[in-house]
Image: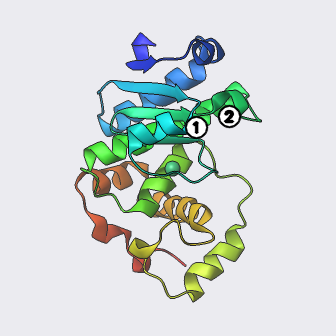
Amino acid sequence: MDKLNIDINDEKLLNILGDNLNICFRINEIRNKFGFEDRVNVLCINNKNDMKKIIECDIPDWVIALNNDNTIILYNLDNWENKSSDFIIQIIVHEFVHIVLNYITNNTCPIYLNEGLALYYANQNQNIDFKYLVELIKNEKFELEDLDYEHDHFYDLSILIMDMFIIKYGEREVIEFIRSLNWDMFSKNNLKL
Ligand SMILES: [Zn+2]
């Protein structure tokens, strides 16, 4: 996929994506918004040991995709139950956003912002109980920067908080704060709860 500056090692995946305009539009949109031009690889791996060799640590069973430097790794693509091209594109866009954010912030982006933006650009914000989560943010005593994968509602909270910041500041400002590593703007006090 030369026009996207993306290398894909898997014939089957190339066929699934084909000349999909949706992925072209979304990847280019993110590249433009964040000013990220580097080449990215998509690697399909079916064997856990091969995966371990690349990322050098154990991965939980539920993980189907991850990123490492400039590489998106899709794990066990053949066994994915829902293999619609839309689903696969969501996963690729999600991991692509992580790569962009890790690069432009030199791996300093707080994980809930990193995850929130990945979910936001991949349109993975359906079926979230916003009301319940807003109450949870209000009532639970946690600082945003302490939010991590240990929290039961980590993904849902990340996308909700990202949505709230985008509503408050606008997308362009949010990106600017991230590019300038201005993490103070993302405090709990700045959320309209
Ligand atoms: Zn993620």
**Residue 191 place in picture, x, y as percent:** 47, 74
Residue 4 vs 103, above or below: the answer is above
Find out whether the residues at labels 1 and 2 contact each other: C-beta distance under 8 Å: yes
What residue do we see at 33% from left, 57% from top? 109
Q: Amino acid at mark 2?
A: Phe
What residue do we see at 55% from left, 39% from top? 48
Q: Rounded to the nearest whole Å, what is the CA distance between mark 1 and mark 2?
A: 6 Å
Residue 173 vs 183, above or below: the answer is above
Kind of element beneath mark 1:
helix
Q: Quadrant of residue 20?
A: top right
Residue 84 vs 112, above or below: the answer is above
Q: For mark 1, what is the residue?
A: 91
Residue 117 vs 10, above or below: the answer is below
**Residue 102 place in picture, x, y as percent:** 32, 47
Tell me if the residue at label 2 has its CB under 8 Å from ligand 1: no
Residue 18 marker: none
Tell me if the residue at label 1 has its CB under 8 Å from ligand 1: no
Quadrant location of the C terminus? Answer: bottom right
* Near-viewer residue (128 or 96): 96
Kind of element beneath mark 2:
helix
**Residue 28 place in picture, x, y as percent:** 43, 26
Q: For mark 2, what is the residue?
A: 87
Mark 1 surroundings within 10 Å by alpha-carbon count, few (fewer than 14), some (14 through 19), many (20 or more): many
